[in-house]
Amino acid sequence: MSGDPDRAGESGSPPPKNCILQHPSYQLIRKLEVEDSAQVHAAFLVYMDLTEVRRWKEVSCVKSPELQVVLLEGREKEGTPIQSVLPLPVDRSLSHESIRRVLDRGFPMLLCAVASDSTLVYQRMTDGLVTPDPPVGPFQDVGRRQHRKRRRQQQ
């Protein structure tokens, strides 16, 4: 391996640790002055996922002063409604009041749990209970009749 800093990150070696700190998007998020550095890091990872991987449109970072967190807002596709995304490290707790404050902003909300290995898990949060969509696929409801039929065959 050469000592060339421009080649760092090639051949499986990790990039320099400060490359995230120097990223323009990370610097933008840090300017929001949220004190929790783990939440700032989580917000950066989610921001990069939304913009670079999922290709969301009009993604912006806003500070929630009452929660002291970075919220992301953007559109999943052109012309769809704006959604709020709350990036949160998995080791942090979240109260009902916190969820309520984000939902009260008036946008649909996604909670994004960020693991220490940078795994992201998104969960849609709603105001109240929502009936789930039926399963998609060639499923048949065999119901209780099928169960009774099998029981009779076993006797």
Image (spheres, rainbow, N blue to C red):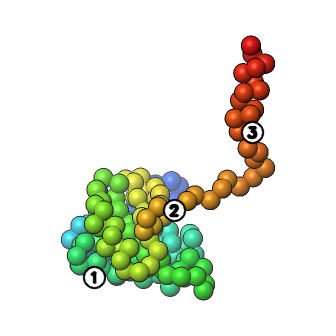
The residue carrying mark 3 is 142
Q: Nearer the viewer, residue 141 or 152?
A: 152
Q: Are marks 3 and 1 in contact (CB under 8 Å)?
A: no
Q: Is residue 144 above or below residue 124?
A: above
Mark 2 vs mark 3: which is more N-terminal?
Answer: 2
The residue at the far top in this view is: 155
Q: Is residue 108 left or right of residue 79?
A: left
Looking at the picture, how far across and down is residue 96, in whole percent?
A: 30, 62
Looking at the picture, how far across and down is residue 67, in whole percent?
A: 25, 72
**Amino acid beneath label 2:** Val
Q: Residues within 10 Å of mark 3 (few under 14, many from 20)?
A: few
The residue carrying mark 2 is 130
Q: CA distance from mark 3 to mark 1?
A: 57 Å
**Amino acid beneath label 3:** Val
Mark 1 vs mark 2: which is more N-terminal?
Answer: 1
Q: Quadrant of residue 54?
A: bottom right
Q: Residues within 10 Å of mark 1 (few under 14, many from 20)?
A: few
The residue carrying mark 1 is 31
Q: Measuring 34% from the left and 67% from the top, which residue is drawn there? A: 99
Q: CA distance from mark 1 to mark 2?
A: 37 Å
Q: Is residue 151 visible?
A: yes
